[in-house]
Each structure stands twice: as structure tokens, then as C-alpha cells.
Image (cartoon, rainbow, N blue to C red):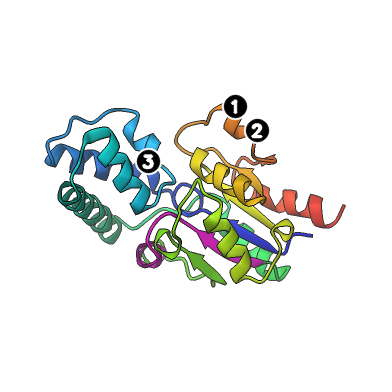
Amino acid sequence: MIKAVLFDMDGTILDTERIHKECWEQAMSNTGIKYMPTTFFDLIGLNDKSTREYFRRVFAFTDEQYDEMSRQAYGLSREYGTIRGIPVKRGFFELTDYLLEKKIKRAVVTSSLVSEALHNFERANINVPFDIIIGGDSVNEGKPSGEPFLKAAESLCLPVDECIAVEDSSNGIRSAYNAGIRCVYIKDLVDIPDEIRSLAEFNAKDLEGVIEIINGINYK
């Protein structure tokens, strides 16, 4: 019986990965780094701590260099959201209406800071009440560690087999898998490797498709 849906945010609830990609490319360019096509996709699903470690390892960044680039990237992203708003992924409101009707809990498990998530939801005009938001600053180890999803289930006072995750990234799917939580994969910017896709028990075209999956589990 599914009693909670654990949503990733960027690329799953919000159509923001395109925005983040543009902002990080600009921030890297401003910092004097030649942008590598694979860089952004390596970063999808990582929290700030893991992203910092990535730039330290791949580009030999100091903490000061990373802090400056990160400040620029987040600033550009916030400016975009404030001026243009943030688009919501197809099927989100239909799914949340269903979850509210069925009294199924709703959590957000994101690698973004909790404050950034709240800001983004405001800019996207999302007023749906989430039961809990687990951000990258809520855990010691971010995705692909299972800690973020485990903390969400624990915060909701539910066992992992009564939760289902919804993810778009390799790091997110691996995180749900490592937590022992069934996962729905919904493609966003790019497809993911077959070996990672196989870790997700379900696939859906969009968020509305998650309704059928939950019905198939709860009412078969």
C-alpha cells in the first residue's frame, strides 16, 4: 500500500533543469572555465556538498572559487525565476489533486537547499501543501546516497515499502534504490543509462501517469 509519494524537485516537479544548465554554463564561463558538455549532467541530482567535491576533483577548484561560481549560478537562477516565473511539469496538479483526495502524503526530496525549494515553489505558484521537504542541507550525504529518501520516510513515520519515489536523474534513482524505495522514472532533459533505468521499478510519460501506477499497487 502506497501511503506517500516522495518527489524530486528539479526536472520532476519543476521544469528547471534547462534553466539551471544555462545559469551554470554562464557562471562557469564567468569564472574562466571552459564548459564541458557532460559537466551539467554529471551534476544533476547532487547536493551542494557533492557538487563542491566534483569541482574540486575535476577542476581543482578552491573553496573560494566554488563559492563565487555557485553564488553566481544561484543568483542567475533566482533572477530568471523572479522575472519569468518557473514552469511546472505536466501532470503535477492532476497528481497532487489525486493524492490529496486519497489522503496520500506528499514529500519533496531535493538536492537543492530547502530555502531554494521554497523560493522556487513560490515563483512557480505552487501552493500545494507538502508534508515535508528534505533538502540537500537536511542530510549529511546527498543523492545518490539513500539518506535523503530514508530521512523523508522516517519524517513521515512510514516504512520504505509504503513510499514511492518519483525521479528524473541517475543520481536520484540510485538514491531511491539505495534506500530500498520503489521508484518511478520520468525522462527529463536526457535519457539515462539502461543499467540505471533498470533500478527504477516503474516508468511514466509524465506525472499524471503516476496515478495509474499507484492505483495498480493499492487497488489491484
Disc 2 marks which amino acid?
Ser
**Can residue 207 be seen at all in this image of the molecule?**
no
**Can residue 15 be seen at all in this image of the molecule?**
yes
Q: CA distance from mark 2 to mark 1?
A: 6 Å
Instruction: Give the image location of residue 17, x and y in percent.
Output: 39, 44
Instruction: Please indicate whether residue 114 sits to the left or right of residue 65 in the image.
Output: right
Question: Label 1 neighbourhood size at 10 Å, few (<14), some (14-19), many (20+)?
Answer: few
Disc 1 marks which amino acid?
Asp
Instruction: Give the image location of residue 117, x and y in percent.
Output: 40, 62
Location of mark 3 (residue): 43
Instruction: Please indicate whether residue 220 sits to the left or right of residue 26 in the image.
Output: right
Q: CA distance from mark 2 to mark 3?
A: 21 Å
Location of mark 1 (residue): 194
Location of mark 2 (residue): 198
Question: Label 3 neighbourhood size at 10 Å, few (<14), some (14-19), many (20+)?
Answer: some
Tell me the quarter of the image containing the N terminus: bottom right
Disc 1 is placed on an element classified as helix
Residue lying at 36% horizontally and 67% vertically, measured from the top left: 115
